Amino acid sequence: MSARIRSRWTMTALTAVTAACALIACSTGPTAKAATSGAGTVRASVQEDFNGDGYADLVVGAPRGTVGGLTDAGYVTVMYGSAHGLSASRHTVISRATQGIPGGPSSGEEFGSGVSKGDLDGDGYADLVISGHGSEDSVIVWGGKYGLSGGTRVPGHGNLAQTGDFNGDGRPDVALFRTGYMTAEDPLTDAVIWNGPVFRAGKPASVTSFLVFTYGAADVWHAAGGDVNEDGYSDLALIEYVGEGTFMTELLLGGRSGLTASAASLPPMTSASSLAMGDVNGDGYEDLLLGDTENGAKLITVYGTRDGLVPESGWTTITQNTPGVPGTSRTGDAFGSSLSVGDVTGDDIDDVAVGIPGKTVNGRTNAGQVVLLRGRTSGLSGTHAQAFNQNTGGVPGTAEKNDRFGGQVQLLDVNGNGYADLAAAAVTEDSGNGAVTVLRGRPAGLVTDAAFTFGGRTIGAPYAGARFGSALG
């Protein structure tokens, strides 16, 4: 098997847990060997591996977590991958109260609402950029042999970040945004790129400002990176609020001088909520996936080519009414509310996980569901699609009203077998505590054997109302 699990530069004071890890980065078990994995194991990209053991690591944001008595201060948990997948005993918990993290926790910061990762300093270990809806500054937490530790302040751009090699020099960069998630009539986001390498003293090789929004004043809400024309430069897709209740999607193309606006026309999205990039037809060019939760609740695939994105006549649209997709579309299902792309089946073609957090399951409204759509050489379709909810046999727990299972999804090969696994968050499980369920990938698709569910309580972190799983990376 030669499965492709490709890095995509992915689109965040704890109360005393034990005497050893109160108010520091709780780290248990990631003292990994520098990596020769067992037979049949696929070594993870350095961009997804914080401790260099060859396994991809999962990032979970809990932005509503209480830290040091401060509500909605927020924290992040990193679950370290291994040959056996994830376990409660191998993790690191990071908050603003963690030793070495600059600043202190503050109520309403929602630290962990945004996460992105990549080897920013070029030392062979992935680093983690953590942002918050109410943050003045982002923080870069540094990877190393024993996992994540220490932090560097990124001043003035604390709300959203996306890593990628935008100028093609082989060194990861990070795009940083100061945005208000506004609904005002004159929204405006300020954005900069820290060009790599980024040094631990808090100095990048250079800083580039960019305000290239085609639609004028814009408030960036979501970002995703990939290379749609396979030219060796990371491109950046954005969902922007442009006022008067309207959202737009924009693609910025990477190049030697950085990011520039694409001439490609993309659809106005009156309630866009998600986007992702991946190669769902196996042609070597990454495609842009757009989730529209209101206008028919649909997933739009805009295919990449050598010349960039295909025109609208070449796009495909999938809904819950598409042949092969389990279930039926209903108002409020929020099909496409979250998206993630990865090769679940090991056929070298990416598949797409689609979150449907508003799905009614057995009469329980907003219980939530996730659908896996299979990539094929002919493009994305409903053929062989799978659906999972908390009433599916083998999935831990029970589908309950307002769990919102599928509120966030992430495809990531956490056990190094060459098949991407699904992490799906039930963001408001147990009255807002939140939980994440992991299902394993196999040649036939996702399976429920060895399914694992965990939350803040599982790992000994603050859990009441934490919205554990609000961000996955």
Image: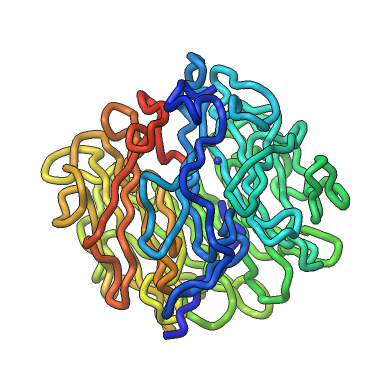
Where is 216 relative to 402, above or below? below
* Percent position of residue 181, x then y: 59, 32
Image quadrant occupied by the N terminus: bottom left
Name the image quarter holding residue 399: top left
* Percent position of residue 84, x then y: 36, 62
* Percent position of residue 287, x then y: 54, 69
Would residue 457 be found to the left or right of residue 281 on screen?
left
Whether residue 275 is visible here, answered yes or no, is yes
Q: Residue at x 54, y 28 (%)?
A: 110
Name the one closer to the observer, 303 or 295: 303
Where is 26 relative to 272, above or below? above
Name the image quarter holding residue 309: bottom right
Name the one closer to the observer, 232 or 318: 232
Q: Residue at x 64, y 69 (%)?
A: 227
Name the image quarter holding residue 246: top right
Would residue 197 be found to the left or right of residue 81 on screen?
right
Residue at the outermost left position: 362
Q: Residue at x 79, y 50 (%)?
A: 198
Where is 454 relative to 325, above or below? above
Would residue 201 be found to the left or right of residue 320 on screen?
right
Name the one closer to the observer, 464 or 253: 464
Name the one closer to the observer, 36 or 171: 36
Where is 71 relative to 218, above or below? above
Colour mapping used in the image: rainbow
Whether residue 297 is visible here, answered yes or no, is no
